[in-house]
């Protein structure tokens, strides 16, 4: 089958110079419809379904072949192409600032005429180019065209015949038809469809009685021989692979022979051809697989605009009118045997489907093909050097998408490896590393100070054991930030969030235990209050262990069910490969953060309640302030984490870890270090409980 949509000639790779001298050996046919634009699409449609070859004596140049048998169905396909181009030109989101043009030719349902039309689309009347172009077919189903190595520039919007022959084989099996005949056209479409059907019928109980081919050069004698085979054969189920143009005259002779009792199985090429169904009642009961239908909202209104008065010089439009209404629009012409149109005619029965646009099939394929071309052009226009994942090498018809791990170079001529990005030990990574190590060292220094002055009142009254636990856990918090720096691996991804979450949970649990002790110590003076017996050293350890254990269980469930893993992200920034750790389970990630937030909020509430208790050194005030800073840092982290791209996502998380750790360190221990190192005279029990006489 020959119908083809040719991509714009501006995209074709010119093999010969435009200045090549050419000689026009035959008549140059003008397009049936033509419209200029920045990009010109060639449309080739079988608006006539047969050709009469002129007589030749090989002495004089033969006359041009005459196209006969006007087909309004194919004419409607051409109008669908024009409508699609018009819609695209009126859009602002598709090919902005560019206009599509078109040249529409009649193939007369023959390969030679179609070839001539293709060359006329590619060449002008003055210049000739040897060109390689891409084509999009709306109706070519031959499986022979599926070889991408042989036909790299051929595309289509219709399934190939491999699917159709499978369906026909299943149809025959379903109805129990085991003895069949096959009639095909004498082209690759028919030959490859027969091969595919035979392949599908192997190892089944369905047998082929005969195979006949409708001759390319129509001959009544040859057709009568085929009909004689059909008449004498006991096979009454006939599968036909043919376009309607070649099948139409065959059916005419078939009807004259008065052969009956045939069950026709139609290929997609003619199963919906209304001109056959309405001309030959013998086809009633035909079964076949049609092309999927679609919807073209404005098609009917557009068809109504095509009339001889709007296109007075277009002979094809006049021919359409003669076919639809059986009258001539040119009364002055003596060549027409039809009566002159009066304007009161109604559309003829056999062509009534021309205006039926409720379920377009091939028409919709044409419509889709034009839009496919438009979207391809739109992508090519945006295929700018260094701006996309495309390569467009010399003499290439199209942009070729680079693999996921590659990007086009500045000239857009080859694919080069993408830049790999992660938070390495560069300037940013080294800065964060230095801050984390400095924080850990500072925390250990404070721990050394507290250990040296462990027997002084300020250390003893503020629960030295819990203070040591808090300082050790803060040291681990600072150090866990180092795991986030460097190329992600399976182990580092699993260690990052689990180490961070468990160390912070330990730290906040210790602060929670200290807050409870502070609150219990000041309320224990009330008569009958024995709260402190439930907050002894052993109970404090149980509280810390229990609160930390909950986080350990959450992390264990996370690592078992959906552990974090390294990911090569090529979608967020298509010019880069971002190496990152995928959480594995976002629910688990937010549960971990949520649990730390819950502990921090509980600490804040209890410390806030104890902030006004008596004493010159009421630690509850500092715990309140530290939890306020902690919560503020992590609330600010959430939107920053979600919106930060690439390695900055990790940097934001490290910053939140370091900021919250420094906040806890300074708020909880800076006032104590100040008294221990700079104001030792205030490091007395009486001063700390507020009983010093001024």
Image: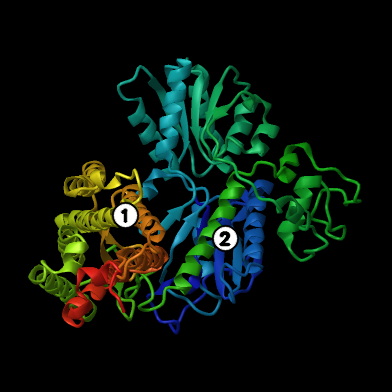
Q: Earlier in the sequence, mark 1 or mark 2?
A: 2
Residue 264 numbered mark, or none:
none
- Element type where label 1 sits in the image: helix
- Mark 1–mark 2 Cα distance, whole angstroms, equals 67 Å
Residue at 20% x, 63% y is: 461
Residue annotated with mark 2: 43
Residue 468 vertical placement versus 591 (above, below): below
Q: Nearer the viewer, mark 1 or mark 2?
A: 1
Classed neighbour count for the residue bearing mark 1: other residues with Cα under 10 Å, few (<14), some (14–19), many (≥20): many
Residue annotated with mark 1: 596
Percent position of residue 434, x then y: 17, 78
Classed neighbour count for the residue bearing mark 2: other residues with Cα under 10 Å, few (<14), some (14–19), many (≥20): many
Tell me the quarter of the picture where residue 453 sits: bottom left
Residue placed farthest to the front in the image? 693
Residue 556 vertical placement versus 371 (above, below): above
Residue at 53% x, 56% y is: 369
- Element type where label 2 sits in the image: strand
Residue 551 vertical placement versus 693 (above, below): above
Is residue 173 toward the left or the right of residue 106 in the image? left
Q: Quadrant of the C terminus?
A: bottom left
Is residue 246 toward the left or the right of residue 148 in the image? right
Tell me the quarter of the picture where residue 262 sits: top right
Is residue 80 toward the left or the right of residue 114 in the image? right
Percent position of residue 368, x then y: 56, 54
Residue at 51% x, 63% y is: 375
């Amino acid at each position: 089958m020959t119908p083809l949509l040719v991509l714009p000639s501006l995209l074709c790779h010119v093999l010969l110079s435009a200045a090549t001298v050419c000689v026009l050996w035959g008549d140059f046919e003008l397009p049936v419809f033509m419209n200029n634009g920045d990009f010109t699409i060639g449309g080739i449609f079988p608006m006539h379904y047969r050709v009469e070859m002129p007589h030749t004596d090989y002495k004089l140049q033969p006359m041009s072949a005459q196209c006969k048998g006007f087909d309004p169905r194919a004419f409607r396909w051409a109008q669908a192409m024009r409508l699609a181009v018009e819609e695209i030109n009126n859009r602002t989101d598709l090919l902005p600032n560019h206009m599509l043009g078109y040249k529409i030719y009649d193939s007369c349902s023959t390969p030679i005429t179609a070839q001539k039309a293709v060359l006329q689309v590619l060449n002008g009347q003055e210049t000739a180019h040897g060109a390689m172009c891409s084509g999009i077919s709306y109706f070519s189903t031959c499986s022979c065209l599926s070889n991408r190595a042989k036909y790299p520039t051929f595309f289509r919007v219709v399934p190939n015949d491999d699917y159709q022959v499978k369906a026909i084989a299943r149809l025959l099996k379903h109805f129990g038809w085991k003895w069949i005949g096959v009639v095909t056209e004498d082209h690759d479409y028919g030959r490859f469809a027969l091969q595919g059907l035979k392949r599908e019928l192997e190892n089944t109980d369905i047998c082929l009685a005969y195979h006949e081919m409708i001759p390319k050069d129509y001959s009544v004698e040859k057709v009568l021989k085929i009909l004689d085979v059909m008449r004498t054969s006991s096979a009454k189920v006939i599968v036909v692979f043919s376009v309607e143009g070649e099948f139409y005259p065959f059916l005419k002779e078939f009807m004259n022979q008065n052969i009956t009792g045939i069950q026709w199985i139609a290929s997609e090429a003619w199963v919906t051809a209304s001109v056959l169904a309405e001309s030959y009642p013998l086809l009633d009961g035909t079964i076949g697989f049609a092309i999927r239908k679609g919807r073209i909202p404005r098609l009917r209104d557009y068809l109504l605009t095509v009339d001889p008065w709007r296109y007075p010089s277009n002979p094809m439009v006049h021919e359409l009118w003669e076919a639809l209404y059986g009258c001539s629009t040119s009364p002055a012409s003596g060549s027409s045997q039809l009566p002159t149109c009066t304007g009161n005619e109604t559309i003829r029965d056999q062509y009534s489907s021309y205006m039926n646009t409720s379920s377009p099939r091939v028409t919709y394929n044409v419509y889709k093909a034009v839009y496919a071309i438009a979207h391809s052009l739109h992508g090519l226009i945006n295929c700018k050097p260094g701006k996309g994942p495309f390569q467009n090498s010399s003499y290439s018809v199209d942009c070729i998408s680079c693999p996921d791990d590659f990007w086009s170079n500045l000239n857009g001529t080859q694919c080069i490896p993408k830049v790999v990005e992660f938070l390495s030990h560069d300037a940013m990574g080294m800065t964060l590393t230095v801050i984390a190590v400095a924080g850990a060292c500072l925390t250990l220094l404070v721990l050394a100070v507290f250990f040296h002055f462990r027997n002084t009142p300020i250390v003893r009254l503020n629960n030295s054991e819990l203070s040591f636990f808090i300082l050790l856990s803060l040291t681990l918090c600072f150090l866990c930030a180092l795991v986030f720096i460097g190329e992600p691996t399976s182990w580092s991804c699993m260690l990052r969030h689990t180490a961070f979450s468990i160390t912070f949970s330990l730290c906040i649990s210790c602060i929670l235990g200290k807050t409870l002790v502070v609150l219990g110590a000041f309320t224990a003076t009330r008569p009958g209050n024995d709260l402190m017996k439930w907050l002894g050293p052993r109970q404090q350890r149980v509280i810390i262990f229990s609160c930390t254990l909950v986080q350990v269980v959450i992390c264990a469930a996370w690592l078992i069910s959906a552990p974090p893993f390294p990911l090569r992200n090529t979608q967020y920034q298509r010019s880069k490969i971002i190496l990152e750790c995928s959480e594995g389970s976002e629910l688990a990630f937010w549960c971990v953060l949520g649990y730390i937030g819950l502990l921090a909020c509980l600490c804040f509430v209890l410390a806030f309640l104890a902030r006004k208790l008596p004493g010159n050194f009421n630690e509850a005030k500092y715990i309140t302030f530290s939890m306020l800073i902690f919560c503020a840092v992590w609330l600010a982290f959430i939107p920053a984490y979600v919106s930060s791209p690439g390695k900055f996502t990790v940097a934001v998380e490290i910053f939140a870890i370091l900021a919250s750790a420094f906040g806890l360190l300074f708020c909880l221990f800076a006032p104590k270090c100040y008294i221990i190192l700079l104001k030792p005279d205030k490091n007395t029990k009486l001063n700390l409980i507020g009983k010093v006489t001024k």
